């Protein structure tokens, strides 16, 4: 049964990106994303966690898959090391909502290596608002325009992945209708991370408004701020 569920997710993702390819201009390079490993994502004991990012940088001439890069030495280490820290912290919070931040940092988060990324990120989902290949610096107007044109497929991907926790990394949730219901709109210049429970027709989800993982902010501060924001939701 588990293998069938995993294959269903793989097939749904494959079909979705095939339709995305048909709808996109021929000269537009698309970057696939989604569940890093469908089996581990679907069958983890803790809540399924999705990280929403802006776009992926690349210079390829053909479509490629972000998931093939994230767990290699060629990925942007600063982005994915911070995502790894956030994922470890969220899992630790679900085990013990009263955990000590500094102890967690010293024990598990100070130094993130490729082995840590490989172990920790295999059961998350990554979701770029813009699937078309981007440059070294994102133009958010371009990202949001692309997302607006492709919103139906983005909403379908969100439904397929069906996350329990959504970490919005620096982008504006107001631009993503499938996050509707959130009470707080992300402020790019905010110095606090914000989290809320968002009611959906099937259940509540936790939505976290975090900085972008490449933001010029101390990595420890980003983790600590996220823990302070999420902890009250888990202690209720």
Image (cartoon, grey):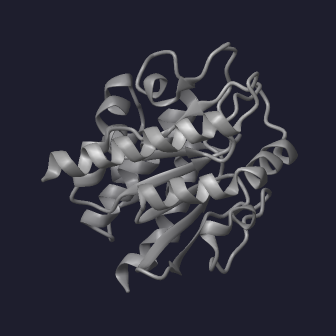
- Please give the name of the residue rendered at 52% of the width and 29% of the height, measured from the top-left corner: 66
**Given the current orientation, which residue lies at the most extreme bottom position?**
236
Q: Is residue 202 left or right of residue 25?
A: left
Q: Does any portion of residue 106 appear in the rendered image?
A: no
Residue 81 lies, in percent from the top left, at 48, 34
- Please give the name of the residue rendered at 70% of the width and 33% of the height, measured from the top-left corner: 132
Foreground of the two, 92 or 146: 146
- Please give the name of the residue rendered at 64% of the width and 35% of the height, measured from the top-left corner: 22
Q: Is residue 42 left or right of residue 57?
A: left
Above or below residue 4? Residue 187 is below
Above or below residue 203? Residue 27 is above
Viewport quadrant of the C terminus: bottom left
Foreground of the two, 165 or 85: 165
Residue 50 lies, in percent from the top left, at 47, 53
Q: Quadrant of residue 174?
A: bottom right
Foreground of the two, 8 or 107: 8
Residue 106 lies, in percent from the top left, at 36, 43
Q: Does any portion of residue 148 appear in the rendered image?
A: yes
Q: Is residue 189 left or right of residue 14?
A: right
- Please give the name of the residue rendered at 43% of the width and 55% of the height, measured from the top-left corner: 161
Residue 76 lies, in percent from the top left, at 57, 25
Number of marks in the rendered image: 0
Q: Quadrant of residue 217?
A: top right
């Amino acid at each position: 049964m588990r293998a069938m569920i995993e294959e269903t997710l793989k097939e749904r993702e494959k079909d979705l990106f095939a339709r995305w390819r048909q709808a996109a201009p021929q000269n537009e390079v698309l970057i696939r994303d989604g569940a890093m490993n469908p089996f581990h994502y679907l069958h983890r004991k803790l809540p399924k966690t999705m990280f929403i990012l802006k776009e992926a940088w690349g210079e390829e001439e053909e479509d490629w898959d972000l998931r093939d890069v994230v767990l290699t030495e060629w990925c942007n280490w600063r982005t994915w090391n911070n995502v790894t820290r956030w994922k470890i912290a969220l899992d630790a919070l679900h085990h013990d909502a009263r955990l000590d931040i500094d102890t967690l940092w010293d024990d598990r988060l100070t130094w993130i290596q490729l082995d840590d990324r490989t172990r920790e990120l295999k059961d998350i989902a990554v979701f770029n608002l813009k699937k078309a290949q981007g440059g070294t610096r994102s133009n958010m107007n371009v990202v949001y325009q692309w997302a607006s044109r492709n919103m139906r497929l983005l909403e379908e991907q969100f439904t397929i992945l069906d996350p329990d926790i959504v970490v919005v990394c620096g982008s504006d949730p107001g631009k993503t209708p499938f996050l509707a219901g959130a009470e707080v709109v992300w402020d790019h210049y905010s110095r606090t991370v914000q989290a809320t429970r968002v009611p959906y027709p099937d259940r509540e989800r936790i939505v976290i408004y975090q900085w972008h993982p490449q933001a010029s902010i101390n990595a420890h501060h980003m983790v600590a701020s996220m823990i302070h924001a999420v902890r009250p939701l888990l202690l209720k």
